[in-house]
């Protein structure tokens, strides 16, 4: 294979199934070449997807995952007692971190979408059981900024999603949510924070509403779950959002984001573990015995559990505070730098999370054209559509590259102004 030639993804691998094996050395070279086609996440070029801190931490992730690369999470507690021990340790640590009361429960899932799907499925199953219904017309009410995985989950479950207008500072509006609730509502859904703007919905007020209406209240903390507690300890203005808020029924939090686990690692936590009986799938009516899964998937990578366990023990609170400090300081310095550029303005307030966005305050400065220019410098810009804005989700890897970004951003602004360039929306930046 000539890996020095331009790589055409549409033709490179045409043909049938390989007839003969290929030596690893050749495959390794090919993989490295393929990887060179990607945005460089370790150089801070991505607004999401990759969570890298140090080579030492990456080595912990690799070794722990590799130690359990063949084990199947489906066999946790049956074939692999070690995975069960590690999983329960992770649960205990999360209960402590998120102020869970005695009697809380948790499920290890493959990611945020999986956690949200199982939260909604559990809420729906509980309502069905309490009402004695095999089927029903149900809905979940949420601010408009809720992650699309909620709608995807609802489609699978035949549940309507009612997205309500945002209120002040683009947060969820409790009054709008209350007005959308009816007798078929089974869940209120809030974000901590919401991904488009990095702002928290009014979780405390939504918790009050959930208690008043006797409704399940799910908090989506997939982005901030393993950052917010540490940022709050460092003095950043993170509002109350977890189980210390009365009315919060369940929480989703991704370990494979700011928890720095390996991909395929999220938690779904319940204030009361008794509701997990509505989540569990149990089947006996076949020839092989009981098939039991706590969540929707069957097989799952044992390496994900081992890596999450290892990383949490390796970092501890001290390590997570260090990462949170680097992440939040990078975020604030990035925002401050953007705000010094004439014609650009970051959304406010700031400091609640490591997500921010900025827009054009100058009618002659097209923000989409700015985004297109940034791509020519190797940056993948996240894009918001209402209003048009560039969105950036910050991790610990970004700090050393903020000045590089700002320098390129100034060049982008100068170029767009001097050429009166107009850009086109590329909605597939996430």
Image: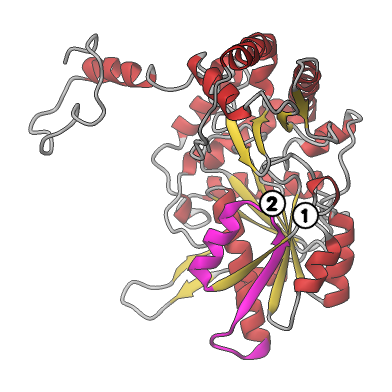
Q: Which residues are magenta?
A: 131-158
Q: Is residue 60 visible?
A: no
The answer to whether 25 appears left or right of 74 in the picture is: left
Q: Is residue 362 magenta?
A: no
Asked whether the beta carbons under mark 1 and mark 2 sit within 8 Å of each other, the answer is yes
Mark 2, other Cα within 10 Å: few <14 / some 14–19 / many ≥20: many
User: Which residue corresponds to mark 2?
Assistant: 145
User: Which residue corresponds to mark 1?
Assistant: 166
Residue drawn at (50%, 62%), measured in percent from left and top?
296
Q: Is residue 98 visible?
A: yes
Q: Is residue 141 magenta?
A: yes
Mark 1 or 2, which is nearer the eye?
A: 1
Residue drawn at (12%, 33%), measured in percent from left and top?
18
Find the distance from the CA under tag 1 to the CA under tag 2: 8 Å
Q: Quadrant of residue 101?
A: bottom right
Q: Secondary structure at mark 1?
A: loop
User: Depth check: 321 or 224 in front?
Assistant: 224
**In the rendered picture of this protein, how many numbered marks are placed on residues?**
2
The answer to whether 300 appears left or right of 271 in the picture is: left
- Residue 280: image location, x then y, percent: 56, 69
User: Depth check: 376 or 53 in front?
Assistant: 376
Q: Quadrant of residue 409?
A: top right
The answer to whether 354 appears left or right of 10 in the picture is: right
Q: Which quarter of the image is occupied by the N terminus?
A: top left
Q: Earlier in the sequence, mark 1 or mark 2?
A: 2
Q: Secondary structure at mark 2?
A: loop
Residue drawn at (75%, 59%), measured in percent from left and top?
165
In the image, residue 226 sits, relative to residue 287, either above or below, namely above
């Amino acid at each position: 294979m000539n890996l020095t030639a331009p790589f055409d993804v549409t033709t490179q691998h045409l043909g049938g199934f390989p007839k003969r094996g290929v030596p690893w050395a050749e495959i390794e070279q090919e993989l490295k070449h393929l990887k060179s086609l990607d945005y460089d996440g370790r150089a801070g070029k991505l607004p999401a997807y990759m969570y890298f801190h140090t080579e030492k931490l990456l080595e912990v992730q690799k070794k722990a995952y590799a130690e359990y690369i063949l084990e199947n999470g489906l066999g946790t507690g049956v074939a692999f007692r070690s995975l069960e021990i590690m999983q329960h340790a992770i649960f205990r640590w999360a209960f402590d971190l998120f102020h869970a009361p005695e009697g809380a429960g948790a499920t290890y899932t493959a990611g945020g979408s999986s956690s949200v799907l199982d939260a909604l499925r559990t809420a729906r199953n509980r309502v069905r059981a309490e009402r004695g219904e095999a089927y029903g017309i149900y809905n979940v009410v949420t601010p408009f900024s809720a992650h699309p995985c909620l709608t995807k989950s609802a489609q699978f479950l035949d549940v309507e999603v009612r997205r309500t207008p945002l209120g002040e500072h683009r947060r969820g509006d409790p009054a709008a949510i209350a007005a959308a609730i009816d007798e078929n509502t089974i869940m209120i859904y809030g974000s901590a924070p919401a991904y488009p703007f990095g702002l928290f919905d009014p979780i405390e007020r939504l918790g009050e509403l959930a208690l008043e209406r006797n409704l399940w209240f799910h908090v989506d903390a997939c982005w901030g779950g393993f950052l917010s507690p540490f940022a709050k300890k460092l003095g950043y203005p993170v509002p109350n959002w977890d189980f210390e808020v009365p009315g919060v029924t369940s929480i989703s939090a991704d370990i494979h984001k700011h928890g720095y686990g390996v991909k395929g690692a999220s938690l779904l936590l319940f204030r009361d573990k008794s509701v997990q009986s509505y989540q569990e799938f149990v089947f006996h009516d076949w020839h092989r015995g009981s098939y039991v899964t706590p969540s929707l998937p069957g097989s799952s990578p044992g390496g994900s559990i081992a890596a999450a366990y290892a990383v949490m023990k390796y970092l501890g609170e001290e390590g997570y505070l260090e990462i949170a400090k680097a992440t939040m300081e990078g975020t604030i310095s990035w925002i401050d730098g953007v705000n010094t550029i004439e014609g650009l303005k970051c959304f406010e307030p700031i400091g609640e999370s490591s997500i921010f966005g900025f827009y054009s305050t100058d009618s002659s400065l097209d923000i989409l054209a700015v985004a297109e220019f940034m791509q020519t410098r190797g940056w993948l810009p996240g894009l918001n559509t209402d209003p048009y804005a560039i969105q950036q989700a910050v991790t610990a890897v970004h700090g050393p590259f903020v000045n590089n970004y700002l320098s390129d951003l100034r060049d982008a602004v100068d170029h767009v102004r001097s050429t009166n360039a107009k850009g086109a929306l590329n909605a597939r930046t996430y």
